[in-house]
Image (spheres, rainbow, N blue to C red):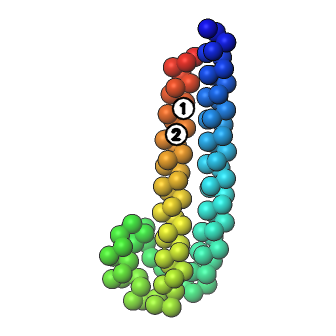
Amino acid sequence: MAAKHECMYILLISIVIGLFVAMLFVNVYFRVKVLKVYKVLVQNEVEFGAAHLFNRQKMEEEVFPRYPKQREAIETFVRHIRYSIRMATVLIALITLFGAILMYYR
């Protein structure tokens, strides 16, 4: 019986470590992608706020008309930021869940 709990504990620790490594990889991967697009936006002096990232209508009304040539770069940047936030949220939730399970099995 103790061996079963120990195997489960090792498996859960491995899952948590794997998820943590995945979160680091996703963070680095999207940081590189976001920084490439961000560099293009900075070079073209494109400015918008955080409110624009999460409000498509506000982006359409206020940012795209000011920077029509940079629309694709702006959309790519926003898409990468949103995706990285979603991935980080899911991975943090999974790490927390498995961490809670580990606390229970201890």
Counting the numbered discs, the total is 2
Q: Which residue lies furthest to the top in this view?
A: 1
Q: Residue furthest bottom?
A: 69
Which image quarter holds the N terminus?
top right
Q: Which of 7 and 105 is in front in this view?
A: 7
Q: Is residue 27 left or right of residue 76?
A: right
Residue on which disc 1 sits? 98
Where residue 17 sits in the image (x, y, percent)? 66, 37
Q: Do the residues labelled 1 and 2 touch (CB within 8 Å)?
A: yes
Q: Residue 94 carries which label?
A: 2
Where residue 99 sits in the image (x, y, percent)? 55, 30
Q: Is residue 3 left or right of residue 76?
A: right
Q: Is mark 1 on a helix, strand or loop?
A: helix
Image point 67% across, 53% down: which residue?
25
Where residue 89 sits in the image (x, y, percent)? 49, 49
For the residues labelled 1 and 2, the Cα–Cα distance comes to: 6 Å
Task: Please tell me how crowded label 2 is: few (under 14), some (14-19), or many (20+) other residues with Cα within 10 Å.
Answer: some
**Amino acid found under the numbered disc labelled 1:** Phe
Q: Which mark is residue 54?
A: none
Q: Nearer the viewer, residue 39 or 72?
A: 72
Image point 66% across, 58% down: which residue?
28
* Residue 91, picture quadrant: top right
* Residue 21, picture quadrant: top right
**Amino acid found under the numbered disc labelled 2:** Leu
Image point 46% across, 88% down: which residue?
67
Q: Is mark 2 on a helix, strand or loop?
A: helix
Which image quarter holds the C terminus?
top right
Vertical order, 58 against 99 (above or below): below
Image point 53% across, 75% down: which residue?
76
